[in-house]
Amino acid sequence: MSWYPVALPRLDRRTFLVTGANAGLGFFTSARLAGQGAHVVLSGRNPERLAAAVAALRERLPEASVDTLVMDTSSLASVGAAASQVQAFDRLDGLVLNAGMVHTPRAREESADGNELVLATNHLGHFAFVAQVLPVLERSDAARIVWLGSLSSRLSGFGIDDLQLERRYDAWTAYAHSKIATQSTGFELARRLGAAGSPVASIVAHPGYSISGRTPRVPGVNAPSTGERFADHLQSPFTQGKHRGAEPVLVAATSPDALNGDYWGPIGWTKGAPVRQVPTRTSTDAAVAARLWQLSEQWAGVTMPVGG
């Protein structure tokens, strides 16, 4: 486990759940948490890919304490079924909301629930999941929810009046909107948890510009072709591997320095050691967040059990 230079505390007797854990940032986040002694639940929508990730992890960490949870964040029924399993947990010390679509469809598609597919997958599914498992997190001592933000939040506006992109769709806007929505919700939840005196912290982290070709090869998890690796290494001055992109997420999930409402990312924005950063004004705008919260509850069919 020499992938990461950043130091983390021991996590024995603690339980973490990571969504989208079968590959990329989610896998490397899960591997490091397990390496520090945590029990890690790897969640993803494909059981076979989850099994491959567990096998790869155990090859490096034979004593790792891991389990799997099948959940497709684009489906509210799948999210509800997964949440019902988590509600039976004795404790949940950390929830890393990593799952999401990066390669978005060229034309607008809808989820099974009738929501724009990228928003449903990257934001609404996680919103619904948190709403249903928050009581489990509150049973633990100082649990954390880590929302995966993105540098795209600095490169796009936020059309709160057309989040479902019914009037005009393009793939980039769909991704950027979903990530701005994620960040806004993470910060709004932090405000509400703080006001309610909850022991749970809500923190947002982004991985910079982290790509597969600069990531250690892990068969069944990360195995880019020679051509892809060569092309990605040409971008090395401003990119890093996904194992390094996982570091701000890991700090947010485990470090005593990370606090409710924080925003963590690489020191060079696209790469580097994890540091506390300043998010965009849109992500922290309370009026935008209140409207987004209302829409998210409506579209996800849930009520978040924390003060308004």
Image: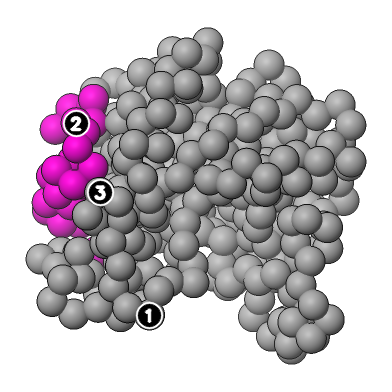
Which mark is in front, 2 or 1?
1
Amino acid identity at mark 2: Thr
Amino acid identity at mark 1: Arg
Image quadrant containing the C terminus: top left
The disc, 2 or 3, on the residue closer to the chain's N-terminal end is 3
**In which quarter of the view is residue 72 placed?**
top left
Residue 303 numbered mark, or none: 2
Q: Residue at x 15, y 56 (%)?
A: 288
Callout 2 crowding tier (Cα within 10 Å): few <14, some 14–19, many ≥20: some
Q: Are marks 2 and 1 in contact (CB under 8 Å)?
A: no
Q: Secondary structure at mark 1?
A: loop
**x and y, in percent, of residue 9 in the image:** 71, 32
Image-based side of 109 in relation to 266, left or right: left
Distance in Å between CA atoms under marks 2 and 3: 17 Å
Which mark is in front, 2 or 3?
3
The disc, 1 or 3, on the residue closer to the chain's N-terminal end is 1
User: Is residue 262 something one can see in this rendering?
Assistant: no
- Against 111, residue 238 (above or below) is below
Provide the residue designation for mark 1.
106
Q: Residue at x 33, y 27 (%)?
A: 132
User: Magenta segment, which residues?
Assistant: 280-308
- Against 36, residue 291 (above or below) is below
- Against 164, residue 195 (above or below) is above
Provide the residue designation for mark 3.
113
Distance in Å between CA atoms under marks 1 and 3: 20 Å
Residue 74 numbered mark, or none: none
Amino acid identity at mark 3: Asp
Q: Is 149 covered by the magenta stretch? A: no
Image-based side of 113 in relation to 214, left or right: left
- Against 11, residue 166 (above or below) is below
